[in-house]
């Protein structure tokens, strides 16, 4: 389990690729303005396309992303 800030999350997604993300669980928390919510929704859908399982922030996850 580890946490990421939003710009690092994009880096991890590109660096790890679909094989390593498949089966991982990832949780997102968004704080701040509506642009942050847009970014989080976009990133969440990108991780889902890459094979990660998006779970609620209150759930146990392999990766936690906080967008502020």
Image (cartoon, rainbow, N blue to C red):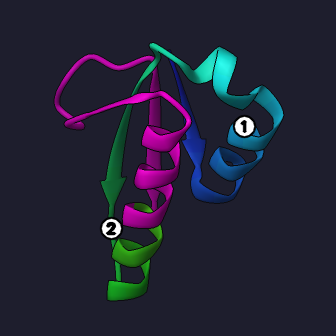
Do labels 1 and 2 touch, CB within 8 Å? no
Image quadrant assignment for residue 31:
bottom left
The residue at the point 37 percent across, 64 percent down is 41
Q: Give the range drawn in magenta.
A: 41-68
The residue at the point 66 percent across, 16 percent down is 20
Q: Mark 2 points at which residue?
A: 31
Q: Which of 16 and 29 is in front in this view?
A: 16
Question: Tag 2: Cα neighbours inside 10 Å, few (<14), some, or many (≥20)?
Answer: few
Q: Which of 12 and 67 is in front in this view?
A: 12
> Horizontal and vertical percent for residue 19?
67, 17
> Horizontal and vertical percent for residue 46?
52, 51
Name the mark on residue 12: 1
Image quadrant assignment for residue 58:
top left
Q: In this view, does 21 lie above or below 39?
A: above
Q: Does label 1 or label 2 sit earlier along the sequence?
A: 1
Q: Does the magenta stretch include residue 57?
A: yes
């Amino acid at each position: 389990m580890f946490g990421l800030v939003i710009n690092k999350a994009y880096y991890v997604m590109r660096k790890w690729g679909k094989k390593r993300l498949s089966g991982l669980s990832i949780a997102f928390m968004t704080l701040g303005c509506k642009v942050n919510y847009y970014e989080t929704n976009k990133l969440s859908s990108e991780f889902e396309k890459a094979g990660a399982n998006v779970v609620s922030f209150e759930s146990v996850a392999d990766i936690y992303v906080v967008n502020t």
